[in-house]
Amino acid sequence: MRGRRVLMDSFLAHGVRHIFGNPGTTETPLLDSLPAYPQLHYIMALHEGVAVSAASFYAQAARCPVVANLHVAPGLGNGIGSLYGALKAGSPMVVTAGQQDTRMRLTNPLLGHDLVAMAAPVTKWSVQIERADEIAPVLRRAFKVATDAPQGPVFVALPIDVMEQETAVEELAADKLWRSTHPDPEGIDALASLLLKSQNPVIVAGDDVARSGATEVLVALTEAIGAPVWFEALRHHAPFPTAHPSYRGSLPGDAAQVRKAFGEADLVLLLGGPFFEDIWYARGGHIPDGAIVAQIEESAERLAFNNRLDAGVVGEMTASISALVNMLASRAPQGYKLAAQRRHAALAEWRAREQEAYRTRLEKSWNREPSSMPRVAAELRRGLPNNVVIVDESITASLDLARAFDYRGFGDYFGGRGGGIGQGLAGAIGVKVALPGRPVVAISGDGSAMYSIQALWTAAHHRLAIVFVILANREYRILKHNTDVWRENFQAGTQHSYQQMDLTGPDFDFVRMAAGMGVEGIRIERSDDIAPALSKAVAANRPYLVEIAIEGKR
């Protein structure tokens, strides 16, 4: 049999049902095989970066591995930024790229390059298949590495001539692996002992909590110890219900501000995630002086990697947190339980005051036109159904969205990791393919949208009912905020206007751009029109764009 048949059979054997890609000549063996494999659905993108981000978000939403198919060196280069985001997000995916005929490798063929070296820095493993006999064993290993904790992308280069070679080595069945690591009882006992001595514990919840379905047991833990829950500054999921009294928000982007957020904490419990990804340098560490640091992590590789620990446990997140809750229930004296209840009541009071302060802020900005972000977030919430899935790349508006929407746990929220923009519109493609039964709304700034605007065509081409909301302030607002911080941090002494951060002259017209790609759209200038427009867009049950004029940086 030919190598390309083994490739396709290997995809099926490992549970792949969707391939996200942008085709090229060296991908002809894969593309020409598709009619014989109706179980495999090819989601076509117009740019490799869109394909990779869509595949990454699909892997997150479907919680299973996926394939992204790119085109030789320039195509892989186009996808590198999105591959970086997938690596930071821990998305289990096998990324392939067609490679030129190996018989031409000494003559520097058109589009040829060392693909393995290009992909290696942003993948868990990078390899080129040299003989058809290697296809099945390399694919088996690729899926195994991609799904090992911490999960992440793997790259496989596929020379066009190797795909046409004959081989007797058939596809290999997917490994039957039980990776759920039960935590060491001694480690859980040590964590419980530390928590029982703590007077002011704090929890930081990472994406692994949501991915492993541990939200419910995390709620039980927070209520048992009376601890606030913080999210990472950049996150892919909402690992804890944002309407819960213990929810405090997302951590800031430098160590000094993180310490300030933790306040008088005497113990910080880290659950999953690499912790911490700073934007700015600040003196000192993230943890308050004298505070105990503990961590539960699904990968020994990431345990204690960035932070010295007083206790660290490797274990599947749900099983580990459940074991900790049970240990506390059996060991906690009545005095500790009463103290935890008082802490929990204090958190509820703080949350009520914080919500009242936000309502005051919302009222003050309610009548501003163009719309203020608090008003836009409130109108979005009013116009969208309760089961909506938010794919968020609103950046400077994300804090207001977090106030307006109650994310209950896995599946309600998807954001981008790594900090590279352009993931939102593309990621919504993957989320909708993975969650076809739920309304999906992508919320993006106008600057971010222009990185992956081609995603609109993919949505129309595959009839994906996604509502794309573009928040149009005609500026890179986040860069203006960061310029302010830079000037303060480095005492730059400059006070002139922001340079190259305004998106005007000419202005974007997203409605016309969407129409050119087969997507109906509308621009909203008045706040009162936002909620009705969103309701109409969702009810249309087809790709739809809503551009909302919002105020710029004041």
Image: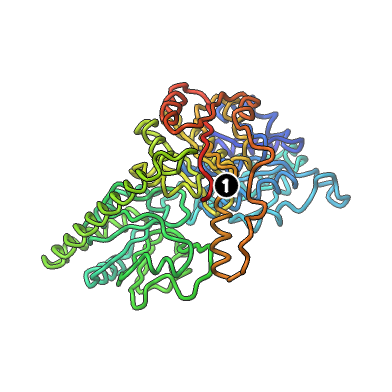
Q: Residue 541 in the image: state x and y as whole percent.
A: 47, 23
**Residue drawn 45% across the image and 42% down it:** 372
Coloration of the structure image: rainbow
In this rendered view, identify the residue nearer to me: 412 or 261: 261
Q: Residue furthest left?
A: 334
Q: Residue at the right extreme? A: 107
Q: Secondary structure at mark 1?
A: helix
Q: Visible in this render: residue 109?
A: yes
Hey, what amino acid is under mark 1? Answer: Arg
Quick check: 115 left or right of 430?
right
Residue matched to label 1: 140
Residue 136: image location, x then y, percent: 62, 44
The one of 531 and 149 positioned closer to us in this rendering: 531
Point out residue 208 in the picture as x, y percentages from the top left corner.
41, 53
**Residue 250 appears left or right of 443:** left
Q: Is residue 472 left or right of residue 115?
A: left
Q: Residue at x 51, y 23 (%)?
A: 542
Q: How many residues crowd mark 1 within 10 Å: few (<14), some (14–19), many (20+)?
A: some
Q: Residue at horizontal 45%, vertical 27%?
A: 533
